[in-house]
Image (cartoon, rainbow, N blue to C red):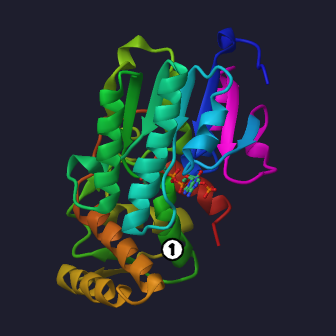
Amino acid sequence: MNNGNKNAQTVLIVGATGYIGRAVVAESVRQGYDVIAVTRSRKDDSAFDGAEVVVADVTDPASIAKLFDRKVDVVISCLATRSGLPEDFDDIDYKATLNVLNAAQKSGTGKFILLSAICVRKPDLPLQLAKLKMEDALMRSGIDYTIVRPTAYFWVFDSQTRRIAQGKPGFVIGTGDQARHNPIAREDLAGFMVDSIGNSERKNRIFILGGPEVADNIVTHRESLLMIFDALGKEPRIISVPEWLFTALIRITRFIGLFTRRVAVFSAFLNVVHYYMVNDMRAPGYGSVTLRQYLIDSNRKVPT
Ligand SMILES: NC(=O)c1ccc[n+]([C@@H]2O[C@H](COP(=O)([O-])OP(=O)(O)OC[C@H]3O[C@@H](n4cnc5c(N)ncnc54)[C@H](OP(=O)(O)O)[C@@H]3O)[C@@H](O)[C@H]2O)c1
């Protein structure tokens, strides 16, 4: 589908159905690229208006190679496992993404834009190790690249917002003030990624990216909860879980998880929550949407 400008450059997006991928598809269409959204099953979705939707299996190199039978100028990867299981990070965030890079390289694609994560700065979790391997493969590939390492997304506040909207308390680990961050809106992140296509200053560089560096967006976890209570017009009620108790819970569930997949997934989730609550995630600011604005907008249609 030709959207009329940008010299008819074709942008192929993998992970197109994800939280960020959908915004990247919309932004690429908006900027006038010819957009191929790769999905793993047929999706009838207005998010893909103006894009061509193509079904392929990113875990199968042959299936991916077919995507490049025609000329692709740019690949944007927003692929990420949804399971949270350690082995799946290696399979999707690394190996499947590498399949796409290899096919892009063979076909002479000019640029590869990779969505990574700020947390690879302090690698500790399987997610981060897989992402670092992929970053490394991309940097060695010889293809022009831009790697984007965003800080937290706004959706990570949705579960606490839901709980609080239902009259439950919010929770933090320890005081909730150990770490500060400036989360980024998916539209702002998608804008940065798509703008990187034709921007020579972003060639072969890694960008750590947060949302606006203003009071309404730079928060500790406790402060973000206070913002949620405020947006919902409720009296703050916050439970502090001692850090030793939380880490004990992670260890116990990790052990039980050796026998039960559901508990293994839950344990991996707790591990990620712990990591994000105690490690600083502040990043250079970009974009315009603040967490407070997002929470006010969500309050108009509180997620349930
Ligand atoms: N959450 C945060 O605050 C945060 C912060 C910084 C960076 N990040 C990073 O940002 C990246 C993208 O996040 P997101 O929230 O957009 O992810 P997401 O919503 O979970 O989307 C993941 C995408 O990958 C696809 N995918 C997963 N497993 C697949 C498989 N086996 N075969 C084919 N496709 C598969 C999904 O397809 P389906 O729709 O078919 O499942 C979806 O399109 C992740 O790497 C994450 O680590 C997250």
Q: Which of 60 and 221 is in front in this view?
A: 60
Residue 49 magenta-highlighted: yes
Q: Is residue 280 left or right of residue 87?
A: left
Residue 268 coordinates in the image, percent (x, y): 36, 73
Q: Name the residue under label 1.
A: 234
Identify the residue at the far front of this view: 62
* Residue 53 placement: quadrant: top right
Q: Which residue is drawn at 31% across and 72% down?
A: 271
Identify the residue at the far top of this view: 7
Q: Which amino acid does label 1 sit on?
A: Lys
Residue 199 coordinates in the image, percent (x, y): 45, 15
Q: Residue at x 34, y 22 (%)?
A: 204
Q: Nearer the viewer, residue 94 or 270?
A: 94
For mark 1, give the secondary structure. Answer: loop
**Relative to residue 197, is residue 37 depicted above or below?**
below
Magenta span covers which residues?
Answer: 24-51
* Residue 274 placement: quadrant: bottom left
Q: Which residue is drawn at 79% across and 45% down?
A: 46
Residue 279 seen in render:
yes
Q: In this view, does 195 lie to the left or right of 63?
A: left
